[in-house]
Image (cartoon, grey):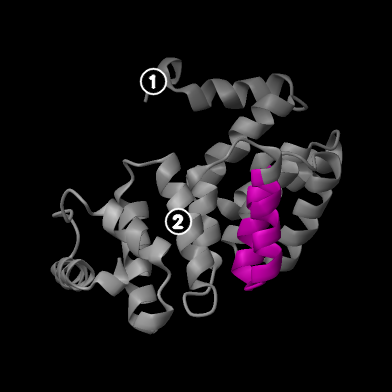
């Protein structure tokens, strides 16, 4: 590509002229991570943070790069520093969630998602991530409730809706008829009062059709 048309050329020139430019450094590190050059990103960010002032967003990018390299301890150390400087940043809190999820630390991962929801406008994607962490056996009702809120926030999202309906179906499968919550039954029926989405897998559509027939034919389930 002709350098005059290549934005990366100008980004590199900007850093040559002003190597301490935090904004340019952020763009350059993001570019390296986007290209999959995680080791280069780690080297560049460590060098920048050593030579110039501390920057929470750059620490966050460093944590992301370490996470891609599966260097969890280094990622945690970097995100801890970032949170010290910017404890309310949604971007930094989300990276902290990703690190804890990678470690298998469900409690801490949920904690960071809850902090995001408490500090920022409700996010359907964050709610979906929270639902994904909840156990389908012991926390199934809570999982459904969280997915219901996520779907209500983003009703056009097919992924959200299919996951929600699959959880409802599991709830019906694992719960005795006499223990079924009437509100859960009504909510399930209301979600599907017009039609069963054609984009659902055939096995799911068949289970939905059967369950709806059972619900409509039994007054005890209404």
Prevailing secondary structure class for the magenta stretch in the rendered image:
helix
**Residue topped by disc 1:** 2
- Please state the horizontal and vertical placement of residue 206, each as a whole percent of the image: 14, 71
In the image, residue 143 sits, relative to residue 88, either above or below, namely: below
Q: Which of 22 and 79 is in front in this view?
A: 79
Look at discs 1 and 2 and give the one toward the viewer.
2
- Please state the horizontal and vertical placement of residue 210, each as a whole percent of the image: 16, 73
Contact (Cβ within 8 Å) of mark 1 with mark 2: no
Residue 109 falls inside the magenta stretch: yes
Pick the quarter of the image with the N terminus: top left
Q: Is mark 1 on a helix, strand or loop?
A: loop
Query: Over which residues does the magenta segment extend?
Result: 92-117
Which class describes the residues within 10 Å of circle 2: few (<14), some (14-19), or many (20+)?
Answer: many
Residue positioned most to the front: 219
Alpha carbon separation for disc pair 1 and 2: 48 Å
**Residue topped by disc 2:** 147
């Amino acid at each position: 590509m002709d350098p005059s048309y290549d934005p990366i050329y100008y980004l590199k020139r900007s850093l040559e002229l002003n190597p301490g430019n935090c904004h340019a450094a952020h763009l350059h590190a993001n570019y390296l991570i986007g290209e999959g050059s995680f080791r280069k990103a780690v080297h560049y960010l460590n060098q920048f943070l050593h030579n110039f002032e501390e920057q929470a967003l750059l620490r966050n990018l460093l944590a992301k790069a370490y996470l891609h390299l599966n260097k969890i301890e280094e990622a945690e150390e970097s995100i801890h520093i970032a949170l010290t400087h910017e404890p309310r940043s949604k971007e930094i809190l989300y990276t902290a969630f990703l690190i804890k999820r990678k470690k298998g630390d469900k409690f801490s991962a949920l904690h960071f998602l809850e902090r995001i929801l408490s500090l920022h406008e409700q996010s359907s994607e964050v709610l979906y991530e929270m639902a994904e962490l909840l156990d389908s056996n012991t926390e199934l009702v809570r999982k459904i409730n969280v997915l219901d809120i996520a779907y209500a926030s983003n009703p056009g999202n097919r992924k959200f809706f299919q996951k929600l309906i699959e959880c409802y179906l599991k709830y019906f499968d694992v719960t005795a008829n006499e223990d079924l919550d009437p509100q859960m039954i009504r909510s399930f029926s209301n979600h599907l009062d017009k039609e069963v989405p054609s984009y659902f897998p055939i096995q799911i559509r068949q289970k939905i059709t059967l369950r709806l027939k059972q619900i409509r034919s039994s007054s005890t389930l209404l």
